[in-house]
Amino acid sequence: MNKPVTTLEKVIFDASNQGMLIVDNDFLIVDINRWFIEAINGTKEQLVGQSIFELFNFERPQYMRGTVKQALESGLSSFLSSALHPRLFPLHSRYQNGDRYMEQSCYIKPILFNESTYCLIQVLDVTSSVLREKLLKKTYNDLNLFKIAIEHSASSIVITDNLGFVEYVNPRFVEIAGFTSEDAIGHSYFSLSSQTHELQFESTVLSALHLHDSWKGERSFVTKSGDKYWVNEHIYQARNASGKPTHLIAIQDDLTQIKDIARKASYQASHDSLTGLINRHEFDQILINKIKYADNKTSHVLCFLDIDQFKMVNDTSGHGAGDELLRLAATLFDEHYPLDKVLARLGGDEFAVIVHDANIAQVQLMSEALIEKVQDFRFRWGESVFSVGMSIGMTLITAQTVSSTEAVKQAENACDAAKDMGRNRVYIYQEDDQTFTQRQGDTYWATKINEALEFDRFALFAQPIVPLLEDAKPSYEVLVRMRDTDGSMIPPGLFLPAAERFNLSHRIDRWVTENTISWIEKHCSEIAHIDHISINLSGLTLSNDTFLAHIVHVIETSKIESSKISFEITETAAIANLTQAKHFINVLRQQGCLFALDDFGSGLSSFAYLKNLKVDRLKIDGMFVKDITTDVIDEAMVKSINDVGHVMGMKTIAEFVENDAIKERLIALGVDYGQGYGLGKPVPIDDILVTSTEVV
Amino acid sequence: MNTEVLSDEHRDTLSELFNIGMGRAAQSLSEMVGEEVILSVPSLHAMPYAEALTLFGAISDEPINAVEQYFDGQFSGNAMLFYTHSSSQELVRRIVGDLSSSEDFGEMEQEALKEVSNIILNACFGCLAEVLECELQSGVPKIVNGDVSAVLDNQRTNLGSDPLVLTLSMTFSLPNKSIEGQVSLIMTSESISKLVKELERFSSLYVM
């Protein structure tokens, strides 16, 4: 049992941590160390003498052969890297207990021994380095990706140390906040945006981080140049692997744009886009607050404003004109009432104003002045010129006011009352007002009108139309009154607007027409002194064919002279329903009836239409007449209407002749007829018979 | 001292030899990376060590990556192939593939650079030995990083007090990309004399 001869070199050879393999010129293994034997899992006896190309299945044996040959024949050493020759020798590694192919670096060098050249192949297991490298690369690539994400983030990102001193700012932060990396790095994040409350903010954030590792909220931030912007911010506590806080990460999302959008949206929700005034909803909110904080010392006045001519402008000149009128009205109202007020457009042609800290008397004066201003105002649209009127209802806002709805309703009802009383006036709501306690709005009147029609509670009144120039016969305009259940008379201003709104006016017109005709028939011998009786028709009646046929039938079957009947239609009604009006006028004129155009001039768009409307008489709007003695423009207006009327072969009638001075002026101008309190008040129709007997 | 150690003919002959070697190296590199690699040596100079140091310093003031291999035999010295940091990165990336986007070289990249340089240097030695029919042995390659002066440190290379430097500018032409490198053979003055002698013998055999 001879122990094999061994040398120190031999021991070292076997103890090496590298694989060593020595081959001769024929690539046969001359010697192989323990590392290699173990890696192959063979025995030395087995391996020595074998060709490496038989023992190992190289991926590129030619390359290996060339390299070994270069060492043996030219004496050149080579290096084969794991990068370019992955798993050169098909060996396994025990790295991390796994059984996987071994990554290797390989040195191939010539060695001289006993006058012969051999080739030493040295193999290093670099599996762990390769894996570590791959992991590093992956980490690096991931980090690089995160870096790109952060650098291109739409959010501002700031990383600070655990005390809040900035270590990194991303480009978005630089862009929005205006601080460059140099400006920010090394400075406290909490004092970058130099605002007074920052110390407090810092402690808020730090305590939140202490408790929850994060803080979230909205706050303002001031840029380097001093501009303020809003951010939604999230600050996190970053911790290292052992849980120790190391950094703070702040992510800011710019809210300025969102806030702008929100502001815009809330503006749109609370404002009327046409006039720029606040809308009904917003007005209600303000009013609710006013009422909530009202005390006994101060009061506010709520006004409800309604533009009378709006519908006509809209109907005759289109929505563009109507919109423009509303815009102008809004500006006018805004300039008229004191600065400290709330003005809103509630919808359509309805506006509302709250005048703060004011009493009714003050606001009444203001409102009356406004009405005058509006009356003097002429609205021009293209070729047309309109005069505009308005009605204003007022109510007081005090601690006693029940609700905003109630307050608006009071002012609206007061406005309706102002309209009913003839427009262009202010009406103040009073709690004990009989008109109001009864009058719960239009529906009240609708019921009342229906009842009156059913129980025949209408009455005819008549007002004389007096010839001014020649000794002609007077005529009379028939007016309708409603008898209340208690026997009192209700003026038409109260119920006619409701009748129009509830589409009942043609029924009233029908009642008036039928009763007037039968009255004429009944008293035909007693009205010889009367030229004719004039009946008012509403705009809606003009377009009612049934009504027209019925009237024609009534006239034909009665025994009266049709020339005893005249119909008055308002200029605005005629223009609004021009085609129907022309038809209506033509049919009844063929029957022999007369026609008058009422309130002429109120629309001021009228001359052009006159040519199309074959009427016999022109009634000049009282608005121009009442101030004729003092207002030269009004006088000129009356004169020109009168002249045009005459040129077209019409007789002219002036309304609102309230005194002798007006009458004299009208005579001087050559107006044919006059009507008004100065010439004769409306009286029950039978009274004109009595008068006539007396005259005769 | 005459700075021009080699005559024009010597330079031409050596250029010729090295270009043959580069052709071989290019072939193995092309096989390895799967795309065409062309290597060429457009210029060759021999100069004193100090002059070379100045020259290389002028070429690049950034740190260099060098692969060094000693050679021994009829003439001996240190062969170095060095690149600027950026061109070595570019080269490795093109050869190994886009393993990493990191600024710094990883171990795998260093090894790849070592292998590629080893192929080129071996090709140079191989040609010299073969054509000049002389015995030559080379050691294994190793990486040296740093400034030009550190890489070419006289103490480190241990080649006598006043070695001469034979320097070859070389160009790697890869598709769409050319990368410059410098091959330097730093030799003792006796080795250069021997080399010149061998060159003259070679010339007398073929150029007559």
Image (tube, rainbow, N blue to C red):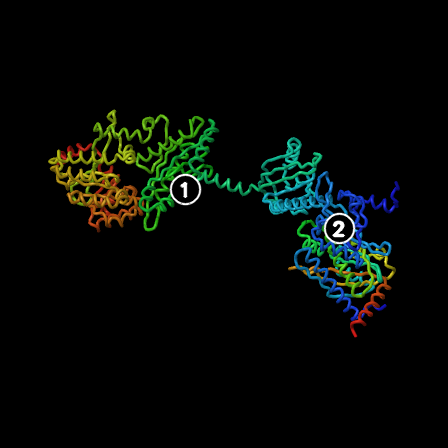
Task: Please indicate whether residue A496 sits to the left or right of residue A23 in the image.
Answer: left
Question: Residue A438 location in percent, x, y?
Answer: 32, 26
Question: Residue A137 location in percent, x, y?
Answer: 68, 46
Foreground mark, 2 or 1, reads 2
Q: Are marks 2 and 1 in contact (CB under 8 Å)?
A: no
Mark 2 or mark 1: whose residue is earlier in sequence: 2
The three-letter code of the residue at mark 2 reads: Ile
Task: Please indicate whether residue A212 sits to the left or right of residue A657 in the image.
Answer: right
The residue wearing badge 1 is A330
The residue wearing badge 2 is A52
Instruction: Kindly indicate the quadrant of the structure image that contains residue A242.
Output: top right
Within 10 angstroms of label 1, few (less than 14), some, or many (20 or more) residues? many
Q: Secondary structure at mark 1?
A: helix
Structural distance between the alpha carbons of marks 2 and 1: 103 Å
Chain letter of the residue carrying label 1: A
Question: Residue A67 location in percent, x, y?
Answer: 75, 55
The three-letter code of the residue at mark 1 reads: Ala
Quadrant of the frame with the N terminus of chain A: top right
Query: Which of the numbered marks, if any, corresponds to residue B163?
Result: none
Q: Residue furthest front?
A: A1
Task: Please indicate whether residue A135 sits to the left or right of residue A28 in the image.
Answer: left
Chain letter of the residue carrying label 2: A
Foreground of the two, A424 or A105: A105
Task: Please indicate whether residue A644 sits to the left or right of residue B183 in the image.
Answer: left
Could you tell me how many numbered marks the image carries? Answer: 2
Question: Residue A503 location in percent, x, y?
Answer: 27, 35
Quadrant of the frame with the C terminus of chain A: top left
